[in-house]
Amino acid sequence: IGVGQGVHQLIRSLQRTEGNSQSSAEDFVDQPARVTIAVRPPARGEIGVRMGNREVFLPAIARRDDDIFESGAQVVITSYQGGLAEVVSRREYEFAHGTS
């Protein structure tokens, strides 16, 4: 499993390098995303976010240390800096912004 996970991470890293060459923080902030590798603080996970007709994969951390997001969870990007997305649950985001 460890080797498979390493290969997966390498492929995703290459995809991130290709996919984000023209993207900025403003493109990602407040966008919904799907967790593709579990986000379990303090470890980073990964999310997929739709950008036009493609899905871009980004390393991600939870905004709060007590949040855990399993693969498949729906989240929203609250900040993006240094190639790292910070996320909250979609439910929390919608509550804070008065949307549903």
Image: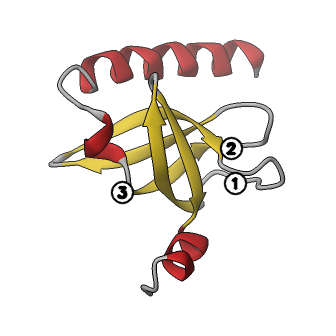
SS for tag 2? loop
Q: Position of residue 73 (x, y in %)?
A: 60, 60
Q: Is residue 13 left or right of residue 3?
A: left
Q: Residue at x 38, y 58 (%)?
A: 30
**Alpha-carbon span between mark 1 and mark 3:** 16 Å
User: Which disc, if any, is residue 14?
Assistant: none
Q: Is residue 55 visible?
A: no
Q: Position of residue 83 (x, y in %)?
A: 44, 24
Mark 2 in CB contact with mark 1 (< 8 angstroms):
yes
Q: Which residue is mark 3?
A: 31
Crowdedness of circle 2 by 10 Å Cα count: few (<14), some, many (20+)? some
Up the image or down, 96 lies above or below 46; here it is: below
Name the one closer to the observer, 81 or 87.
Answer: 81
Name the one closer to the observer, 17 or 61.
Answer: 61
SS for tag 3? loop
The amino acid pointed to by label 2 is Ala
Up the image or down, 42 lies above or below 48; here it is: above
**Alpha-carbon span between mark 2 and mark 1:** 6 Å
Q: Residue at x 57, y 14 (%)?
A: 7
Q: Earlier in the sequence, mark 2 or mark 3?
A: 3
The amino acid pointed to by label 1 is Phe
Up the image or down, 17 lies above or below 71; here it is: above
Q: Is residue 40 visible?
A: yes
Q: Which residue is mark 1?
A: 69
Crowdedness of circle 1 by 10 Å Cα count: few (<14), some, many (20+)? many
Crowdedness of circle 3 by 10 Å Cα count: few (<14), some, many (20+)? some
Q: Position of residue 88 (x, y in %)?
A: 60, 58
Q: Which residue is mark 2?
A: 38
